């Protein structure tokens, strides 16, 4: 029997969490339903397992990143968008990095404390350019470190997001959004 990751949604008034990630051995769909009789349960695909394990074990130490990815997974799982969305674990990790960077841009758009004297579209273009530059740096780093083999999800996310934020700070001269 193989271990499976599930996302369990509990929409009852007494729920302390709206969803939780569960890893276990469930041989049939009925065993899943009997384990969680009053919840909506969705099985998650294998390409997500390393990200889910990192989230569940709190190895993703950036709370902004962990919260953003958890929310993304929950949102997509509710509408069953994961079955064939990604071709591999690496593609899903790339998507997680992209989601975190996009969420940072949204936070900037909503809550950016300090502002340069730019129009809104100029801010967004500058952030888009920062994302492209950070992606270029990330791809270059992957090529240069290919000999190292597999890097943990938490480490890849930390390094990629830090590269993006450093690029933003370099372009703006300051960190437009404090994520602490």
Image (cartoon, rainbow, N blue to C red):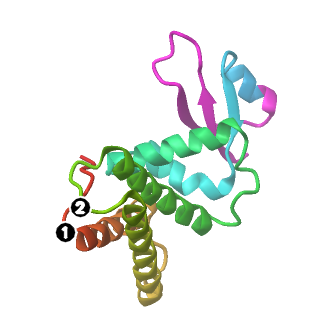
Q: Position of residue 66 (x, y in %)?
A: 41, 47
Q: Quadrant of residue 173?
A: bottom left
Crowdedness near tag 1: few (<14), some (14–19) or many (≥20) residues, C-alpha within 10 Å:
few
Mark 1 and mark 2 residues within 8 Å of each other at the beta carbon: yes
Q: Is residue 27 toward the left or the right of residue 96 in the image? A: right
* 112 falls in the magenta region: no
Among the 4 quarters of the image, the one containing residue 47: bottom right
Q: Is residue 123 above or below residue 61?
A: below
Q: Which quarter of the image is occupied by the N terminus?
A: top right
Q: Which residue is mark 2?
A: 116
Task: Please name the residue shown 67% across and 23% down the image.
Answer: 35
Query: Which residues lie in the magenta part?
Result: 1-30
Write down the quadrant of residue 127 in the picture: bottom left
Residue at the image position 49 percent from the left and 43 percent from the top:
70
Res 30 visible: yes
- Circle 1 is placed at which residue position? 173
Can you see residue 25?
no
Q: Is residue 135 left or right of residue 45?
A: left
């Amino acid at each position: 029997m193989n271990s499976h990751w599930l996302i369990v949604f509990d929409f009852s008034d007494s729920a302390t969490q709206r969803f939780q990630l569960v890893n276990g051995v469930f041989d049939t769909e009925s065993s899943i339903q009997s384990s969680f009789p009053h919840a909506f349960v969705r099985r998650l695909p294998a390409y997500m397992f390393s990200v889910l394990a990192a989230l569940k074990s709190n190895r993703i130490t950036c709370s902004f990143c962990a919260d953003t990815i958890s929310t993304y997974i929950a949102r997509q799982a509710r509408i069953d968008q994961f079955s064939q969305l990604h071709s591999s674990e690496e593609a899903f990790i790339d998507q997680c990095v992209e989601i975190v960077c996009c969420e940072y841009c949204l936070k900037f758009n909503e809550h950016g404390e300090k502002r340069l004297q730019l129009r809104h579209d100029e801010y967004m273009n500058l952030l888009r350019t920062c994302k492209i530059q950070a992606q270029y740096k990330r791809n270059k780093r992957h090529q240069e470190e290919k000999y190292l083999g597999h890097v943990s999800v938490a480490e890849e996310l930390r390094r990629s997001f830090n590269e993006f934020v450093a690029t933003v700070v370099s372009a703006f001269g300051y960190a437009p959004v404090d994520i602490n």
